[in-house]
Image (cartoon, grey):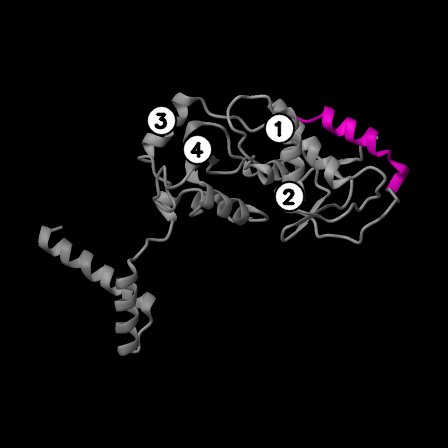
């Protein structure tokens, strides 16, 4: 009953489509489709599988057609919260779930539910299209993760911030969709913000990962100047009718020439 699978590289969210109140192409039965899709989830986490189902049920409500209704971020978050609160039986205070939209990206990515559309903070199950699933994402052992953190001196290699100011994500330098593996050399600790920026930049990108500033920031990320030095540089460039980028390169070149002459190199 599940629709034909297509192979793909990095998948983008679809554009939203006019809502269909009742019609479903091919007369596919909602309950059957949901059951078959949910049984084939490759994610090893049973909790995440449950969240995937909640999200799909919210995107395709009973009695509705496909394309489904347009669902706001807050509605998806509330659906996950209702499910979690119904399941929660712990003694500690309940904490809201923070990874709702990571689960959505996994549904559309690792799980191959490529019919999900998104525009801004609105989502929609545009079609029942399925694609090849990816190899499940692994979680590093505590020992391996500590080794990687120590390699990067417990700092995000992009923005240089550290915990507790930021929270780290285990990031593949070269994405799995571009051939990256799970070897330790392909991992880095990105903060939540930089990880989200990298994920957005990678979508549809065909540039070489080996020279990407997101994949190898320690080699290719732009160097940061203080705001004072940027102001001084731009002022001097304006006074001398120079390009500030050319002026900066002249200053750096002059520094290394002087250093070489002082050391006799």
Q: Residue at x 78, y 27 (%)?
A: 35
Dot 2 falls on a residue whose secondary structure is loop
Segment colored magenta: 25-43
Q: Which residue is mark 2?
A: 11
Q: Nearer the viewer, residue 142 or 122?
A: 122
Is residue 83 visible in the rendered structure shown here? Answer: yes
- CA gap, disc 1 to disc 2? 20 Å
Residue 71 horizontal side relative to residue 91, left or right = right
The answer to which image quadrant residue 157 occupies is top left
Q: Which residue is mark 4?
A: 187
Q: Nearer the viewer, residue 230 or 193?
A: 193
Q: Which mark is residue 179?
A: none
Which of discs 1 and 4 lies nearer the camera? The answer is 1
Dot 1 falls on a residue whose secondary structure is helix
Image quadrant containing the N terminus: top right
Q: Are marks 3 and 1 in contact (CB under 8 Å)?
A: no
Q: Which mark is residue 48?
A: 1
Which of discs 3 and 1 lies nearer the camera? The answer is 1
Q: Residue at x 53, y 32 (%)?
A: 95
- CA gap, disc 2 to disc 4? 22 Å
Q: Which residue is mark 3?
A: 147
């Amino acid at each position: 009953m599940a629709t034909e699978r297509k192979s793909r590289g990095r998948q983008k969210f679809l554009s939203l489509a006019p809502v269909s109140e009742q019609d479903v192409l091919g007369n596919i039965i909602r309950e059957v489709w949901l059951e078959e899709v949910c049984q084939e989830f490759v994610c090893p986490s049973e909790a995440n599988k449950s969240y995937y189902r909640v999200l799909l049920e919210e995107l395709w409500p009973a009695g509705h057609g496909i394309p489904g209704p347009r669902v706001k971020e807050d509605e998806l978050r509330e659906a996950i919260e209702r499910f979690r609160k119904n399941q929660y039986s712990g003694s500690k205070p309940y904490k809201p779930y923070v990874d709702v939209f990571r689960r959505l990206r996994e549904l559309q990515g690792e799980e191959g539910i490529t019919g999900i559309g998104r525009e801004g903070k609105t989502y929609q199950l545009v079609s029942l299209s399925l694609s090849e699933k990816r190899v499940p994402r692994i979680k590093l052992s505590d020992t391996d993760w500590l080794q990687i953190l120590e390699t990067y001196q417990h700092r995000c290699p992009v923005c240089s911030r550290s915990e507790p100011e930021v929270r780290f994500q285990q990031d593949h330098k070269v994405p799995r969709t571009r051939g990256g593996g799970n070897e330790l050399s392909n991992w880095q600790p990105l903060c939540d913000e930089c990880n989200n920026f990298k994920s957005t930049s990678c979508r549809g990108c065909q540039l070489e990962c080996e020279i990407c500033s997101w994949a190898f920031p320690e080699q290719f990320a732009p160097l940061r100047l203080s705001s004072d030095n940027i102001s001084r540089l731009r002022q001097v460039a304006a006074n001398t009718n120079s390009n500030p980028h050319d002026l900066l390169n002249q200053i750096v070149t002059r520094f290394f020439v002087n250093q070489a002459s002082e050391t006799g190199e």
